[in-house]
Image: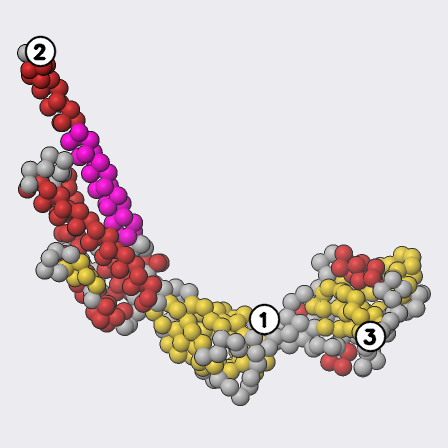
Amino acid sequence: ILTTIMRQESQPLEALQSRQAALQSRANTFGVLTSRAVALQQAAAALSDASQLSGFVASTSSASALTASASSSAIPGRYEIVVNELARAQVTASTTAASDPDAIVASGGTITIGGVTVTLAGATTLRQLADAINASSDPPARASVVQSGPSSYRLVVTANTTGQANAFTITNNLTGGSGIAFGDADGDGTSGDSSADNAVQASDASLLVNNIPITSTTNTISSAVPGVTITAFQQNPGTAIVVDVATDSAGVTTKIQNFVKAYNDFAAFVTEQGASAARGDQTSIGRDPLLRQIKDQVRASLASQYATGGALSALSQAGIEFTRTGTLALNEATLASALASGTADLERLFAGSTGTPGAFA
């Protein structure tokens, strides 16, 4: 009798506990909805930024000789580039050699390199001379001690940057010690002003870009091809290197595929919740108005027409299509056709323009 009474009295509690479990399950299901919605939002955000859609890629026929990288301002096309000359930094070595880096080569005087004067006071070794040049204020060149043979050490002065504009001269007025000298082929008292004085003569890069002469003080050039930075590594006057600049369709395709997957995951979740609600599952949110509202709004956005002012006004024209089952699929042939003339129309459709939001905005 007591057991029967206890069972009857506990029925309201058991009903509340069952209700509590169902509500907790619904709360967990709303958490899943949140994760699906956030994934969908993030995938849409990647397509709502025009700067992330206007990508280009540059490729070369000889990456060992020349590389190219394209920015968002690049213009698709093919460019033939001939590297006639590389930019080089001037290198000038002393014509005299010391028997040891710590041999005294001067006891005073001055040495002027590219207009920067270094004054010595007291006995100075070859190594100390190099250190003094490098420690001077804003030197145009760096000095080093190089072993050129057994018991033979020379002072080598190298320009900080490449190009003829960064060439330097040396005026040597050092005194005392064993002495140090530099080449002076023209006998004017200044070294480095003729090619015979230098181990490497300063030179500019010289290129032909579609038969248009281009010169640069460096081997990295960003003004020869619109929106493309090229870097030359080898000179070969008789060979044209082909640089192709094209829309980075692979990057755009990946972003769209990510969105299609995120939408299909969301749509599968909505379908699952609807089916469980039809079975009378109390833990389902299939009949919740919030879920239906999100589903309807997202689907309406994807199926709408947009006044972009361009050639594309619907996502289906960019290859984002609904299937018979209500999922999304990417028609890559349609997308490739939409990208054939660049990304401008796609940007207006996806990201919109001033005062006109796009499909993913």
Circle 3 SS class: strand
Q: Is residue 39 magenta?
A: yes
Q: Judge left or right: residue 153 versus residue 258.
A: right
Magenta stretch holds residue 358:
no
Q: Amino acid at mark 2?
A: Leu
For mark 1, does the 10 Å Cα neighbourhood hold few (<14), some (14 to 19), or many (20 or more) residues? many
Residue range in magenta is 21-45
Position of 265 with respect to 227 (left or right) is left
Where residue 358 sits, quadrant-wise, is: bottom left
Could you say which is closer to the camera, residue 188 or residue 177?
177
Q: Position of residue 280 (x, y in %)?
A: 6, 37
Q: Is residue 117 visible?
A: no
Residue most toward the top? Answer: 2
Which residue is at 60% across, 72% downward? Answer: 217
* Predominant SS along the magenta part: helix
> Relative to 9, is 238 above or below?
below
Three-letter amino acid code at disc 3? Gly
| Marks 1 and 3 in Cβ contact (< 8 Å) | no
